[in-house]
Structure formats: structure tokens, C-alpha cells
Amino acid sequence: MFSADHVKDDGTRQTLTLHRLADTAIKRHVKVKGNFNPFDPADEQYGETLRQRRLLEADGTGHSGAPCTARNTADVQYADVRSPRKPGGTITTSSHG
């Protein structure tokens, strides 16, 4: 038997216990196509789909920020952080992924 303490969002502590190893779900990795380039505009939609799937699997909310109850992401706009912010500007990348 394995156990660990966990602090919930409301600040209360909870002990999580794994009684049987078979209770652990097996999650397979998602294969990424070999020619995928995150900086290629042609692969933008594919990369966004991978990112959204990863975020949904991580915590079920679909993002890494504050909790959100909206499930319709059709109106959500994303900023392209790979584009210069002003004419003649430089393109910088973040190590935060």
C-alpha cells in the first residue's frame, strides 16, 4: 500500500492511498508525427490540438491558469508568440513551452 498527502484547492489536506497497483491507470504517450515543426505555420493547428489534449489530460480544465467553466472554445483567441510584436522586431521564444 502506498499513500501520500495532498493539499486540495480549498487548502484542506487529504491522504491519497493506493491499495493495489492494479488501481493505477495506464496512460500511453501520444505519438507525434515525425515531421512536426512547432515553428512552421502549416503545423500550427496540429500543434494546438496536441497542446489542448495535453492540458485536458493534465487537469481536465483545458488550460494551465485559473479555473474556467466555459467548455466552448470556439470564441477563444490565441496570441501567436512567435511573431514580432512590432515591425522590425525580433522573434523570441519562451522556455516555458
Image (cartoon, helix red, strand yellow):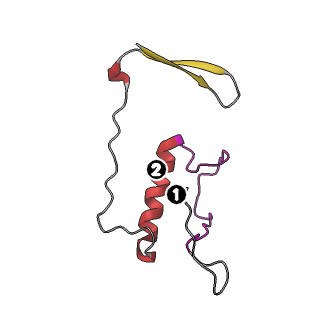
Work out whether residue 10 or residue 39 is closer to the camera in this orientation and state it: 39
Residue 62: say if magenta: yes
Q: Quadrant of the N terminus?
A: top left
List x then y, in percent, for residue 44: 46, 70
* Residue at which label 1 appears: 97
For image coordinates 41% across by 71% down, the residue present is 43
Q: Residue at label 2?
A: 54
Residue type at mark 2 is Arg
Question: Which SS class for mark 1?
Answer: loop
The part of the image, by quadrant, that contains residue 42 is bottom left
Which residue sits furthest bottom? 88
Q: Do the residues labelled 2 and 1 touch (CB within 8 Å)?
A: no
Q: Percent from the top left, x then y, of residue 76?
A: 62, 63
For the record, the magenta segment spans 59-82
Residue type of the residue flagged with mark 1: Gly
Query: Residue at left 48%, top 63%?
Result: 48
Looking at this rendering, what residue extends furthest in the left direction? 34
